Image (cartoon, rainbow, N blue to C red):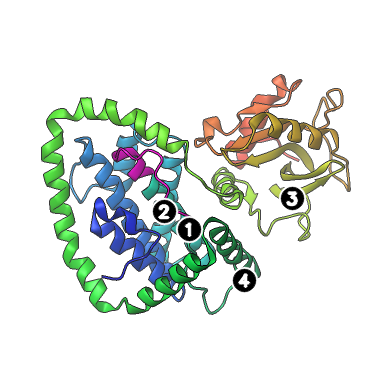
Amino acid sequence: MPVSPNFAFLNSHDSQLVRLGTMAERYFKEDPVTCLMKLRQFGELLAQLVAAKVGLYADAEEPQIRLLNRLSYNNLLPGEVERLFHELRMAGNNATHQRRGDHRIALSSLKYARQLGIWFHRTFTADKNFNPGAFIPPPEPSQETEVLKQELERLRLLAQENRSFAELAQAKASQEEELRQITEQLLREAEAQAQEAFQRLEQLQTQTVSQSNQLIKQTVAKAQQAETQIDLDETETRRLIDAQLRAAGWSADSENLTYNKGTRPEKGRNLAIGEYPTQNGRADYALFVGLQIVALVEAKRQCKDVSAAIDQAKRYSEGYRIIGEETLVDGSPWGEYKVPFVLRPMDANSYSNFVLKVGFGFATYADRIIYAALFPLGTVPKG
């Protein structure tokens, strides 16, 4: 069976994972909605395998959200792992029930699925430093936005940096040829194998259920260690933060709602404006409640130097200047700092951990910032 080089390493765990990942890539170019449906199935099967390997699998009909909550309760989905599982679930639900999804979401979801697969492999094998190489982007859609075009090109360049030109060309040609070979036969094969996959889950559960408590304890530490190696670029970091902010009632889209594209504070709106200018550089986000700026947010990958990122956020606060009608919060400035600043690193997976560091002098205001950033519109100051 022709398979995607991005997911082939999962064959040692379950061939159905490889089929689903391959089909998702096959549909990316012409049908991103179906791509997202297949990735939802990928996430469901991967979570079921996690459960079965520690004796927590129930049955194939258990809702994904209930399974994810149980795994999270047992500390088996640390940090960004849980967040990525939910991103696949929610995007897949939108695709399945509302036929909603685009190439940008599909590309992000393909990268999320691969990172989850790598995390799974590192957690449940002895190869804790497993590295399958750079993500190879799928074939370009016939119609693509400028942002998506740039993202695909960036991924190709990144892959080229990590592999020789010959290796990259061979992998790319192989991927496109293999994906062209996927037909209805592959779909029928996947459907036929689905029942066998469920049977394997039940067999694995039978083998592990008597040792469940011991296996959970052994797995938690490995899962946490593997989570620290999840490698999402800053583009995906921002997309995840966008989703968190939108869920909390903010208007957020760091690719479109940016200062350079004309987004400005508005009365009656909670806006997270991307790439907001200060005299010391551009902050990743400026959070506005109406015309009042309540925070500058700096988004960083987990592997970045946290101390340096905090210093950078401080400089943005020092360099903030009023451009139009916007106003500062009560009590500002605090010495040289004009706006509270927040560092959001990659490992801040939950809303309660969203604000890891708040600038010195803002202790009294910190709780208000947390509420403004994380809770619905009715709970934040009006501006």
Residues rendered magenta in the picture: 119-134
Which numbered disc, 1 or 3, marks the residue closer to the eye? Answer: 1
Element type at mark 1 = loop
Which numbered disc, 1 or 2, marks the residue closer to the eye? Answer: 1
Q: Earlier in the sequence, mark 3 or mark 4?
A: 4
Q: Position of residue 353 (x, y in %)?
A: 54, 30
Element type at mark 4 = loop
Label 3 vs label 2: CA separation?
Answer: 28 Å
Please give the residue where the numbered disc 3 appears in the rendered image: 275
Q: Are marks 1 and 2 in contact (CB under 8 Å)?
A: yes
| Mark count | 4
For residue 195, say whether it is visible. yes
Please give the residue where the numbered disc 4 appears in the rendered image: 145
Q: Earlier in the sequence, mark 1 or mark 2?
A: 2
Q: Position of residue 97 (x, y in %)?
A: 38, 63
- Identity of the amino acid at label 2? Arg
Label 1 neighbour load within 10 Å: few <14, some 14-19, many 20+ = some
Please give the residue where the numbered disc 2 appears in the rendered image: 114
Please give the residue where the numbered disc 1 appears in the rendered image: 135
Element type at mark 2 = helix
Q: Earlier in the sequence, mark 3 or mark 2?
A: 2
